[in-house]
Amino acid sequence: MLIEQLQKANIAAMKEHDNNKRAVLSVVISAYKALSIDLRASNKEITDNDLIRIIQKTIKELDDEKSCNLSAGRTERAEEIEIQKQIISQFLPKMLSSDEIKQIISSLEDKSIPAVMKYFKANYDGQVDMGLVNKIARNG
């Protein structure tokens, strides 16, 4: 599972005394554990796709933090944040390109927006930006 890879990377970062890497990995692992506890309460198991969504959310939060630091003139901190983004981005699957999304949509029988969105959610969850899928499906 993906969580095991993250935990191994976190241990390696501790041994290397890489506080920047360890910090971002710990944030993701903590969010995973919190979600795991929440899902256990409703008798559901956490999946790699759940962890991928956590990583994607963390990257968006880091983007926001980076832009705030840049606007405040803290370029050194913004550079650290960019490094953290690169570290956790390594754990994401390859995202589908616009051309790949268009090709998949053209192969579908039902090209209505709800059907396309449902198909991508079921088959490509975590591998595609659903906002991009929606945009492509609307614009043809």
Image (spheres, grey):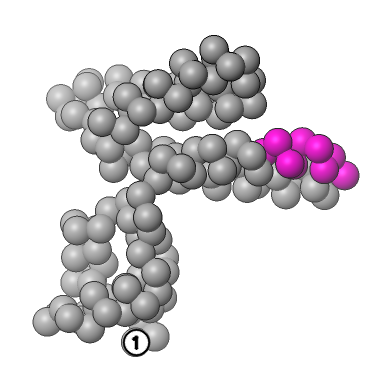
- For the N terminus, the quadrant is top left
In front of the other: 31 or 25: 25
Query: Picture quarter containing residue 96?
Result: bottom left
Above or below, 39 against 91 in this view is above
Residue 76's spot in the image, x, y percent? 81, 37
Specify start and end residues of the magenta stretch as a single range. 73-81
Query: Picture quarter containing residue 132?
Result: bottom left
- For the C terminus, the quadrant is bottom left
Q: Please identify the dominant SS of the magenta region.
A: helix
In front of the other: 75 or 33: 75
Give the left or right position of residue 59, taking residue 35 as reference: right
Residue 140 within the magenta-colored segment of the rendering: no
Single out the residue that lies furthest toward the top: 15
Above or below, 15 against 66 in this view is above
Bin the neighbour count of mark 1 within 10 Å (Cα to Cα): few under 14, some 14-19, many 20 and up.
few
Residue 114's spot in the image, x, y percent? 23, 71
Q: Which residue is mark 1?
A: 140
Residue 80 within the magenta-colored segment of the rendering: yes
Query: Picture quarter containing residue 68?
Result: top right
Above or below, 80 against 39 in this view is below
Q: How many marks?
A: 1
Give the left or right position of residue 10, taking residue 100 as reference: right
